[in-house]
Amino acid sequence: MHPKPLYVNFIAEFIGTALLLGIGLSSVILDWGQGSIVAHYIPSVQARRLLTGLLFGCTGCAVTISPVGKISGAHINPAVSIAFWLRHKMKPHALVGYIVSQMLGAVVGCIPLLLWGQQGKSVGYGNTLPGIGGNMGAFLGEVITTAALILVIFVFVGSPKLRNYTPFTMPFLYSFMVWAETAYSGCSTNPARSFGPAVISNNYTGYWIFWAGPLTGVIVLTAIFKICRLHKYYHIEAARMSHHDEPTNASLKSA
């Protein structure tokens, strides 16, 4: 069996990112939007943060193990693609194609959120904005949470015994991170995740943070792995979050 052409990966990444935002941010609107029935039955802010993180992480997990996730490797996040590229598992043209697909998919995936009407509009359709601590608090929050995300990916994807379980770490990871950090930045960890709702709400306040923070987190974590030679213990075979028998395009194996 031959691997699919790289453009098929781009299409799959576009669809996967659209699904992540369309479904994942619907859970944000459901839990936090004006007139939320969830808020009525779960008035605790802390409990709803846990729930929101769990639902968003479950969405990412579902996309990863879905057919589109198996095709592209389910990065669905420019920060993840850049992390794989820094680990020399993506060729530059593949990286560019993935990021463009993710950003476009994010916008398309957010268009259906307009159907939430006032409930969606009241929370900027899930837009992420600097919170307590201002821009610096948001920046540091994004650095830390993105570094945590990439750490989990590097450890699990780099371990033959753990790599098949990588998607299933996301619900637990995002439950904790959203609970702990969302008051500072909204816990994006994903420039595409922040871009989609920024476009449809026409609110780009502090959007640079959602590139600068994740990129810094990725660079710092990757540098730590290199300096400490951890890449020898956690060897990544391919730039993918899901591992299975389907052949991987050569552009996602080495750079």
Image: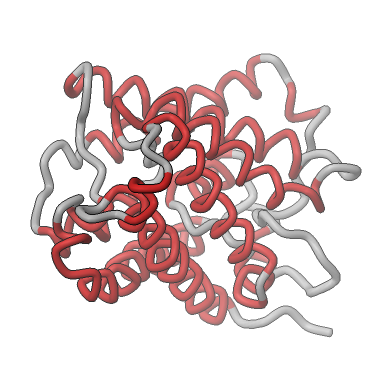
Q: Is residue 129 left or right of residue 49?
A: left
Let me know if residue 24 appears in the view: yes
The residue sitting at 24% across, 34% down in the picture is 209
Which residue sits furthest right? Answer: 161
Q: How many marks?
A: 0
Quarter where residue 44 is shown: top left
Quarter where residue 1 is shown: bottom right
Q: Is residue 73 left or right of residue 188?
A: right
Let me know if residue 215 appears in the view: no
Of residues 72 and 5, the one drawn nearer to the viewer in this rendering: 72
Q: Is residue 131 left or right of residue 247?
A: left
Which residue sits furthest front? Answer: 41
Quarter where residue 111 is shown: bottom left
The residue sitting at 45% across, 24% down in the picture is 180
The x, y position of residue 227, in whole percent, is 64, 16
The x, y position of residue 251, in whole percent, is 62, 64
The x, y position of residue 206, in whole percent, is 15, 36
The residue sitting at 27% across, 60% down in the picture is 196
- Can you say whether 222 is above or below 9 in the image? above
The residue sitting at 60% across, 75% down in the picture is 68
Of residues 53 and 74, the one drawn nearer to the viewer in this rendering: 53
